[in-house]
Image (cartoon, rainbow, N blue to C red):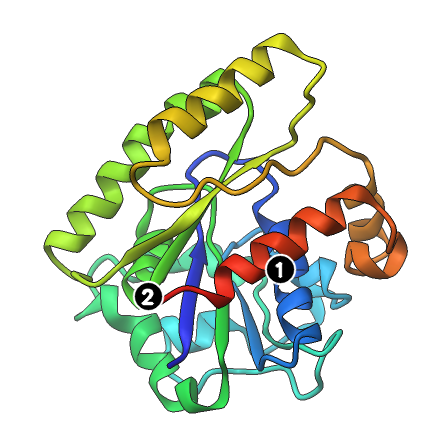
Amino acid sequence: MCRIIALFNQSGGVGKTSLTMNLGYHLAKKKHRVLLIDMDPQASLTTFMGLEPENITQTIYEAVVGEEDLPVHPELIHGMSFVPANINLSAAELELVAALMREMRLKNALLSVLDEYDYILIDCPPSLGILSVVSLVAATHVLVPIQCQFKSFQGTDLLLKTVARLRKGANPSLAIAGFIPTMYDARTAQESRTYEAIKEQLSPLATVFDPIPKTIAFADASEARLPLAITNPKHPAIRVMKKITSGLEKLP
């Protein structure tokens, strides 16, 4: 079965795009067939993957709005297949308002490729808009990065309500793959308290993975348009990423 995992948090700056790229890379290194999809109009994942968004003519926009075939990039990137985005996707929110079966657009686009992949990771936009809903309806699981800050943790309640509404309607089988605390600095008392609160309050719902440490190494790797395991293979965050990857392999 293909696991379709939406990395989602309506808050920006939680490390969602870096996680999508790096978790996909570790899954690919374990011989899984991986497809990444950029559903964010900012197209950060497209840039991180080494492509220039403004030079791409066929993106996820054509599949979701135009109902065309899924435009998978013709070559593997770091062992992964990839569907890019660009600024055109920003118009999708308005164009899908009156579209028939709009919530099903990505789900339908994926039907023809499900047999080709073991994992499909979707980088959702940092909002509760239609593009995030479309992504969550297509997903089998949602993976939630949460920055170890009180404000970010507070927003989790709204996120969980969104998931609950979708379970009651468009995607009853949507499961929570887990929560990933990000940008964690154990030396900071506030972040330590927030991390403990995340574990205490969210563990009953799904796995709370080990925290991703706060480090500039991810930004450096993204600037180089490479996974962290290539630019800094001995970085402590690699061990955490591998552990999360193992957790994703155990998903039902």
Quadrant of the rendering where the N terminus is positioned: bottom left
Q: Residue at x 43, y 58 (%)?
A: 6
* Mark seen at residue 140: 2
Q: Amino acid at mark 2?
A: Thr
Provide residue 100's location: percent of width, then percent of height.
Answer: 17, 70
User: In the displayed structure, does residue 168 sit left or right of residue 242?
Assistant: left
* Mark seen at residue 23: 1
User: In the displayed structure, does residue 156 sit left or right of residue 101?
Assistant: right
Relative to 20, does residue 100 appear above or below in the rendering? below
Q: Residue at x 59, y 62 (%)?
A: 86
Relative to 113, does residue 213 appear above or below in the rendering? above
Can the viewer see residue 67 in this picture?
A: no
Q: Compare residues 243 and 227 and report the one nearer the observer.
A: 243
Quadrant of the rendering where the C terminus is positioned: bottom left
Other-residue count near label 1 (Cα within 10 Å), few / some / many at <14 / 14–19 / ≥20: many
Q: Amino acid at mark 1?
A: Leu
Other-residue count near label 2 (Cα within 10 Å), few / some / many at <14 / 14–19 / ≥20: many
Provide residue 111's location: percent of width, then percent of height.
Answer: 34, 85
| SS at badge 2 | loop
